[in-house]
Structure formats: C-alpha cells, structure tokens
Amino acid sequence: MNKKISFTFDGKKYSGFEGDTLASALIRNGVFLVGRSFKYHRPRGMISAGSEEPNAIIQLESGEITEPNVRATEIKIYEGLNATSQNNWPSLNFDLGSVNDLFSRFFPSGFYYKTFMWPPKYWEKYEYLIRQAAGLGRSPTKDDPHQYEHFHYHCDILVVGGGISGLYAAKLLAKANLKVLIIEQHPELGGQCLNTDSFKTHEVLIKELEEQNNKDNFKIIKNSTVFAYMHSNYLLACQKINNAKIRQIIWKIRATKVVLATGSIERFLTFDNNDRPGIMLANSARKYQNHCSAKDIKKIVIFTNNDTAYQTAIDFFYKQEVEVQAVIDVRKNSNGDLAKKAEKLGIKIFFNHAVIDTKGRKKINSVIISELDESLDKAIGRSKKLSCDLLCVSGGWTPTVHLFSQSKGILFYRESDATFIPDKSFQNEISIGACNGTFELDEILKETYSKISGLLTEFGKKIDVKSRINSEKIFYDKLKHLWIVPSNKHFGRTKMFVDFQNDVTAKDIKLALREGYRSIEHIKRYTTTGMATDQGKIGNINALGIISDLSGVPIHKLGTTTFRLPYTPVTFGAMAGRHIKEFFDVERTTPMHQWHVDCGAKFEDVGQWKRAWYYPIENEGILQAVNREVKATREGIGILDASTLGKIDVKGRDASEFLNRVYTNAWSKLDIGKCRYGLMLGDDGMVIDDGVTSRLGENHYVMTTTTGNAASVMSKLEDWLQTEWPELKVYLTSVTEQFATISINGPYAPKLMNKLCPNHDFSKDNFPHMSFQNIGIDDVHCRVMRISFTGEMCYEINVPSSYGKALWEKCFDLGNEYNITPYGTEAMHVLRAEKGFIIVGQETDGSVTPIDLDMSWIVSKKKYDFIGKRALYRSDTIREDRKQLVGILTKDPNEILEEGSQLVEKITPVPMEMVGHVTSSYYSPNLGRSIALALVKEGIKKKGLKIYAPMPNKAIEVEITNPVFIDPSNERLSA
Amino acid sequence: MFLIKCPYCGERDQSEFNCGGEAHIVRPKNPPDLTDDQWADYLFMRKNIKGIQFERWNHSNGCRRWFNVTRNTATDEILKIYNMGEQPPIVTGIAPKTPSGETSIGSGNISTSYTKK
Ligand SMILES: [Zn+2]
C-alpha cells in the first residue's frame, strides 16, 4: 500500500495516499461538495479528473505562498497540504450567495451588461459589488518566497502528451539518434491507458522510456502543461513542482518538429439539474474508482449517448460494494462490443431513455428517467425514479485541438461524431491519436506507426519494423448527438448547465439567440460561456450544438471560437520567472556609485542608471540639501558625477561630414582640440538630443549625448550610416562605460585643477572655454573638456573608469579648502535652469523645434541639408502661434509652480483657453526666489505679459520673462 | 516569436531584433526642392498591410546590422532576407487567405510564393 498522507480541506483534516490528487483523496473520504458556482452559488463537485475541471478549483495554501484557482484534479497531495474552497461565504456548506439560485430567473445572460451599465456614474459602486460577489479565489498579499525559473530547450522533436500515442511515438523515436523531448501534464505517463485492465503494453513502454530518460538526448518532463504554441514551433510549457524552493518552471521550447498527442476530453450531456455533486464524466468516474475506493458510493447510474461509457458500467459492475443500477442510453440500441458485454453481464440498459432530472441538494441521491419520442425531442410515458449516489455521464469525446489550433492549423468538422479534427497543418507538426480524432486503440497504434515512420524519413532515418505493436480491436457503435436532453418541465424552468464555472445554461444561450445574437464569438461574450478559467474545455462543443439546434445553422458553418493561449492558467510568478526585484531591469551604476552610497545620497532612476539625486547632511530635506549644493557650486566648487552621459566615439574619413548631416550646425571648420554644442533633430524637425562634441583629431570626435538617449541616439546614427549613407566611412563606438566623468564647477574650479595637475597651464588663454585637452593626472591619461552646463567655470574630466573613484576622492582631498560640495541631479537641474539651459525630454517632448526653443543661432542657414532641415519650414513648423520657450516668474517669489501646470491669459469659467505649460520649476537659492521655464504660444513676443497658472483653489499670477535668470552675458565663464 | 535568419549571424529568435518599418523609402537627395506634401509623404506615410510587406529589420541585440525582410504579415512567414541597398524581390501569388474561411480581417494563413526579378 502507498504511503499515507494527511491534508486539510476547508479546515478539516483528512488522509489520502501517496499518488492521490486532491480530488481523488477527497472522493476517497466521501467529500463530493468542493465549491460553489460563480453566479448562483450552487453546490458543485468535481466532474472530471483532469485539467478540464470546471468546478473543483481551490485556493491552495495560505499567506505568501497561496495560489488561487488550482484544479483539485491536478494537484498531487503532499503531507500537510492545506486547501480551501472558493466562492462561498461564510462557508461551503452554508453559503449566503446561494439565494441567487432562488432568484436565478432574474440573472439571465447579459445580466451584468443590462443591469449595471447605467447610469455610468454608479459604475464604481456596481463594480465594487460585482467584485465582492465574483469570488474566484484570492491573490497572495505578500511576496512569494519561492523561485520561478525559465529554461530554454531546443530539440529535433517535441512530443506533447504521454498517453499511448505519445508514448508509442516516443519509443519509435527514441533510438533514432535525434534529440527528443516528451512532455506529459500528469505526474505519470500513460494517459487513458492507466485505466485499462486488458492492454498492458503501455507499462512496458513507460519502463523503457523511463530508463532512457536523460540519456542519448532523450528527455521526459512530467507534471508540465504545454500551454502555448507559437510561431516557428516555439512552445511554452509550465512545470509544477510541489514543495520545493523552485516552484514552477517555464520551458521555452523550440522544436524542429512537433508531435501533438494531446488526447481528448469527454463531453457532458445537457439535462436538467446536471450539476449536482456526484454527477461526473463517466470516464473520470471510472478513473477514480480504479484508483481509489470512494466512500459511500453504493449505487450508480450511467447516462450516455455512446459506447465508451459502458466500460465504466463494466468496471463498476466488478466492484463488490457497488451496484450498477442501470445504463440510460439515448440511442435505440447498440451493437458495440462493450454494450454487448454489459448486456451479457446482466447490467440493466434503458435504450431510448434519458435522465430528465436529478435530486439531492449537496449530493445527488436520485435521477428521474423517461422514455424519449422517436425524434428524441420529448420525454414521453411515465417517468421513473432511480436512486443513486453517483451519476456517470458521457456525451462523447472532443479531441484536444487547442495547441493545433494555436499553431494556426485548419480544423475540419466531422459530422459522424460531431468533432473538430486537424485538417491542414500550418507549422511543422503532426497530430496523432485521440487529438487527431482517432479513438480506437488499435487504430491509434497503426496511425502512430505510420506517421512516425514518415516523420523519421523526413529526418533521413528509418523506422525499426520490429518495434511495431498491435492491440485487440474493439468495435464501437455510432453515437447519437442529443445537444439538449428533453425535460418534462417548461424550458424556462430548467437548469441545464453548459458552462459550469460561469453558470451558463441552455436557457441563457436560447435567450441570446432570441435577442438577436448570431455569431458564435458574440454569443460567447454575451452569455460568458467558455470564458471561465477552464475556457470551456467540457462545455464549448455543447454550446455549439445547442446554438446549431436552436438556430438551424449546421455546426461547421458556426465554426469554433478562437483557441487562445494559455491552454491552462499560468501564474504571474511563472511568467515573471527571475525577472523580479533587482533583476526586473538592468541597473547601471557609475564607478563612483559606492562613494555616493557611503555619503548617504538619495538616488533617482534615469533610464537604467542610478544617479545621485541629492546628498542630505544630517536631517536635511531635499529643498535644504539642494539649496546648499546649488549655492556651494556658485560660490566655491560643486562636483558632479556625470559618468552616465552617453559618449560615442566617432572615427573615420567622413566623420566631419557625418556630423554635418546629423547636427543642425556646421562641424567641418571646428579646430582640433575644440568643443561644440550640437542639437540633433529627427527628420520631422523636432529636437531629439543635444550634447557637446569634441574634436580629438582630423578624423576623430567624441560625441556626448543625454543620459537617457544614449542608446537610441547610437541606434539612430547607425541606422543612417548603414541604410542611408553607406558611402560614408565612419565608425561609431559606444564608450560610455569606458570613462568616468567628473564635472568640476565653480569659481575655484581652476584652482582645484591646478592642484590636481600642477604642471599644466589652466589659464583661460591656454585652456579657454569650449576646448579640449589631453592631460595626465598622476600619470593617468584623462580627456578634459572646458564646457559648462551650470554657467560656472567648469572642467569635465573623463578618466578611464577604473580610476574614476580614486580621482573623485582625490578631488575631495584637494578641494576641501574651496568647500568642495557634491551635487546631485536635482541641483544640476536648478543650476542649468538658472541659466536657461534646456533639458531634452523636459523642455522638449518630441513636438519642439530649435526655433521654438529660440535657438535659431544653432541652425545653419548655409548647409544645403541636414537631418530635420526641410521640416523646419513645413506649414506646421512655421506657424506663428507655436509654443515657444520662455522664462516664468511668479508674482509671489516664494510660490513654486508645479511642473506641468497649464498657463492661461484669462481666468474664465472652465474650460479655459490654455496658452502653454510649465516645463521646469524650481526654487533658486542664488536669486532667492522661484524660477520656471515654460512653453507658451508666441511666448517670445509676449515677454513682460502677466498670465496665470490656474490651480484648483487659486490662480497664480506670473510674468513671462527671458529664460536666462543668472549671468546673461556669461561673465562667470571667463572670470 | 518567429525566427529570423540574420544574414550575418544566422537564425535567431525574433526577440533579438527590432523592426524598423517599411523598407525602400529613400531619403530624398534634394529636400529643399520638395513641397510640404512631398516631404510629409517621405516623413510620415508608411504601409502597414496585411500581406506581403517589405520591411527593415535590425539585429539590435546581436550584430546591430540592418537588413531587409520580405514578410507576410498575416502569417509571419519570411519570404526573403536581403541586404540594404538591394532591390526588393517581385512577389507574385494570391492575397493571404484565412485559416477557416473567416473574413479576411484577422489572422490569415497561407503561404505565398515569390520570384526574384
Ligand atoms: Zn546579426
């Protein structure tokens, strides 16, 4: 006997055995009531034993590791497993929402649309109520301590499904010296074969394959569901691992050939009250009875329209403690082998009969059966009551074509057994076995052999004829569709469930048709059939049949709804994998990063970079710290880590010509050793980047870009070079991370430079503003530029990254006497705004031209062409009333405007006519007042005009000014 | 997630590439001579059709090279990959059909042949 395992369901302790699923363990304990339905809160039990299960969905575990909507039919029990039922309040046995069932006449299809849409302003309240009622489990509120992984796998052949066809295919492939992967969704290989007494070949196959697992390029992954089939044979599978540090693995598989052996799912029948606990799919009931002895099951009834359910009758017949009351078969008769066998055993069969109703609130206790008329439309004669604890239902079989359909294969409708089966492949795959509409065992073996033989030929291999296996042939008689089982009640009073999880009945579908819905996709959305977590694996075909019956349109003309991925629900944890927290995105740090951290800097994210935002001392807030940093920079020395600026090395014969084309100004005449500011436009004339470029040699420049745009500028430049100007000899190399950049600003900056490099002449004659020099500091070669983004004298030292932190620290040692102060990005913004310097992405938003920025001085009139030039005189870009860059000063110097504030000329009742918006706004400690930059319609003409920034509680009066607030004549640069 | 055969690196996953939109749009050599409409046509007008389309692709997470791709956007079938500056292949064949005979809006599914000029 297997190991005993104890577990908890809804707070009560039970025990099962190793190998049990939660569902089988509950059945073993006589627990059939496992959930409440979504809309009417009707008691529900498990109706299947697989991933198609609509009812037995539970909340697994609690706290940080809890997982909602887990199918009890799929989860293996483990010691201490704790599960609770969902969608009930206050408890499963006493559920208040079940009053909905009494009022079910008032919950027709489209109910939510009809009732809760109007008036719109109440939507928020309705939504709250609906969300309260719509309890499909709860998501965890704490971090999951488990790890989720993504694995990549490339193989020659992927076999999806470890049932008999998949196993046989794998066996035929295993010795062919190909890389083969087989994936099975259940913990054991075998599929339906695990239920058969007569056919034992699968055991041999399983043993053989298990022995070969992980050898010779052959691999088996169990407990894993392939949930997506995408382009170029790219498939995703989710592997579930119980009780381990790694909880789930997503396998990303790229296969040359895919063999789909996904089997089939049994159908239900649509009869009145077909949803009580204890009503199950016949084959699932058989699976449970073969696996575990259900407590309290004494009498069973079988209701079918086909032969396969007779196997269930026969299996139960041999069970001592169970009495098979009867098989109710809607067909006139059956000559099938199994039906004949059942008859011979003395099992009572009611042909031409149907189950028309069931009784029992929390568990079925009896069925009402009745004879049917000739056309199976009406229940005739006197109905009869049969008592039972279990009703096994079979409505035929549906091939699992989800993956085939996701692969964009074309389906074909087979009238004889009402199945959609694969017709034309779109990708390199084949379907074999039940998923291909081949249900009979011997035929499955034959089909698999011949198809795998063909497949091996494609790979230039030969099949081993000795590996051929056969099985005894079983004859199955034809099934009879009966999409709606007749009832002796008025149709409007019946509850014939089609979609169990979403509580959609045959009546709801009829209503949708009566209200004029015709397209299958519309009916699906209006009634919500097939839209629950099970995606209608059991119910969709019945819904189609009912629509076809009622509308008179044949099923193949209705078509199917789209089979979307995922096949089964996938957790967010699995999707995210390791891409969480610090691995969510790349984090880039500068060589001086640790210094900033040690100094207690606050950081801000700029693209992927962590940049020091400000450096609070003791209890300083952001405003105090920034004010101090800004003042120190203008009065002593401010030092900025500018390593994040993009740096692109531009080399080659045509480097100057290239810069001429991508920047608005002229570059050919720039002397070697000089720097120039450039503005880069898109060909639509809008500013996309700016920065200083230095000429290092005749054919050698270093371009700097903004921190955030470095990668996109590099890509764009490469694009121009490779696709538009292949004749230019220019080579671009990103050197952003090769250099640390230290920006030393302030009136004492030259003094510090002298101390850093005593032998060098830093006088303004020898090293003027906008020039570049190679300087050795402690024998380390540095590129130093005299440029300025603060308006102060500034030296930007580019030092090889590995020396960045040492040089940075050295600056502090030597600069102490000048009150050297580190400043962060916030102070950098204030300093540049005081000077009216723009920041691309702040003053510009992709709709701003250089002319709008009042920077026509940088736009060459002489150049015939550059990127963006032609667009600068399109009708739109020369409009007079474009928004232009201006300064803004509030009337009250202590009022700091909100960035993004709208500006108006006149205060009127809303809506007011807006003339612009604030792009940057700060307190300037050097001016002792607030300053702002803004884009205002015709702003350049309107300097001096008083306008307003309307706020919710007041209107702030402001004046349009020049955007340069400090040192407009640039005296500080050459002081 | 289809596969693209980079002419420089070989077959790689789509996630390594970026699509740069319609191919064979040459930047005019004489922008000052063009009317606003002509310039706007170059700047903004791009095809995004269901069917055979000529596109620019960049192996952005690989060799960073640009190349041209002839792709059936309905099926993501790649008919040809060729270098920048090369002429597009002449495409013949039928318009993309749909998988189960549904209307031609949505996903389509049929391979189309092409012959080179
Ligand atoms: Zn490449």
Image: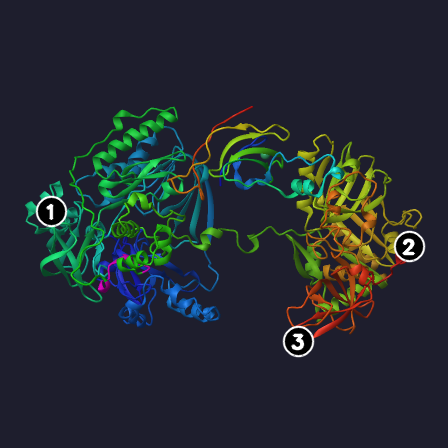
Q: Chain of mark 1?
A: A
Q: Residue at x 38, y 26 (%)?
A: A458
Q: How many marks?
A: 3
Residue A790 magenta-highlighted: no
Pick the residue in front: A717 or A420: A420
Ligand 1 quadrant assignment: top right
Asked if residue A323 can be seen in this view, the reply is: no
Instruction: Tell me if A531 is positioned left or right of A734 in this view.
Output: left
> Disc 3 to disc 2, how far (Cα)?
46 Å
Residue sitting nearer the eye, A293 or A556: A556
Q: Nearer the viewer, mark 2 or mark 1?
A: 1
Dot label at residue A355: none
Q: What is the number of the mark on residue A974? A: 2
Q: Secondary structure at mark 1?
A: loop
Question: What amino acid is found at the position of numbered circle 1 in the picture?
Answer: Lys
Q: Chain of mark 2?
A: A
Label 3 and label 1: CA atoms lie apart by: 81 Å
Left or right: residue A462 compared with residue B42: left
- Provide the residue designation for mark 3: A953
Q: Which residues are magenta?
A: A492-502
